[in-house]
Amino acid sequence: MIERKLTGRKPVINLPNGTIDTQMHMYLPGFPAQEGGPPLPPGLPGPDEYRQVMDWLGIDRVVITQGNAHQFDNGNLVAALREMGSVSRGIAVVTAETDDTEMKALHDAGVRGARIMDLPGGATPLSRLMEIDERAHAFGWCVAVQFDGTHLLDHAERLATIRSRWILDHHGKFFDGLKPNDPRIDTVKRLIDTGRCWFKFAGCYESSKSGPPDYEDVGKVAREIAAYAPERIVWGTNWPHNLIQETEDYPDDAAILDTVVGWIPEKHRRTVLVDNPAGLFDFG
């Protein structure tokens, strides 16, 4: 079984009070994996483990994203939100078939976002974007959109029509890598300029070609976007790092925090880590 590091050396960067982790997953017993998704992560990393990580890194609030293992069953997410209480919000999986009664129940539980996951194991592909946007928009939610950003130019026109506030997830997940002056960087900026698009710093190791410890290829793009529109960036840990299969490959969350938050100019860190996600996810 993989051993997850839950504490250790404190980050060099002190997170501001009220910091919100906008990208993580949480699992409770009694909610089995659903057909079409990956298996549950070993050990079911849940609230107790994550609270240790919060204390270690200096995180105060959290947005819990529905894991792929649970597909369309949001029961685990609702239970996790209940367990974490007022410091938490959620991103659920909904479709056109999710009626107003269920949407209201999810909203009352703390859900403030809907998920698009157009990668293997995801429940809701980009082909369902418009219907999910309609459901989210009706309840004032955002939409978290994750896909292979290699093909961003193919999807840019449709993404620009999203009515809800929405998040381009995981640094855009440019699996083929980005070079200076890549037209997709300007496309991200144009999407941000619509006033409805946010860019999430999370999971840099999933698409970096240059790799640890600096993830410099992802960092170059991140620094450019951070300088361009700090008011449109949010950050997350990507805990418990579900794609990592071996203990020796498990990332040090403090080290990644120092690297990724270090890409944000210090004068903008409170904006990115506190103000942006508080507004986006209705923390009040």
Image (spheres, rainbow, N blue to C red):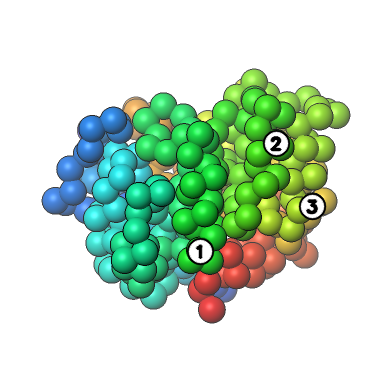
Label 1 neighbour load within 10 Å: few <14, some 14-19, many 20+: few
Q: Mark 3 vs mark 2: give the one in front.
A: 2
Q: 85 or 248: nearer the eye?
A: 85
Residue located at (46% from left, 53% from top): 114
Tell which circle, 1 or 3, labels the residue nearer the N-terminal end: 1
**Residue 167 in the image: above or below residue 151:** below
Tell which circle, 2 or 1, labels the residue nearer the N-terminal end: 1
Tell which circle, 3 or 2, labels the residue nearer the N-terminal end: 2
Label 3 neighbour load within 10 Å: few <14, some 14-19, many 20+: some
What secondary structure is found at the residue carrying circle 2? helix
Q: Percent from the top left, x then y, of residue 199?
A: 65, 49
What secondary structure is found at the residue carrying circle 3? helix
Q: Are marks 2 and 1 in contact (CB under 8 Å)?
A: no
Q: Percent from the top left, x then y, of residue 24?
A: 43, 50
- Marks 1 and 3, how far apart at CA: 23 Å
For the question of whether residue 223 can be seen, the reply is: no
Tell me the amino acid under the disc marked 1. Ala
Q: Any mark on residue 138, and which? A: 1
Q: Mark 2 vs mark 1: give the one in front.
A: 1
Q: Any mark on residue 122, and which? A: none
The extreme left residue here reads 30
Tell me the amino acid under the disc marked 2. Ala
Q: Percent from the top left, x then y, of residue 246?
A: 34, 28
Q: Any mark on residue 193, and which? A: 3
The answer to whether 280 appears left or right of 119 in the picture is right
Q: Any mark on residue 156, and which? A: 2
Q: In this figure, what is the number of numbered marks?
A: 3
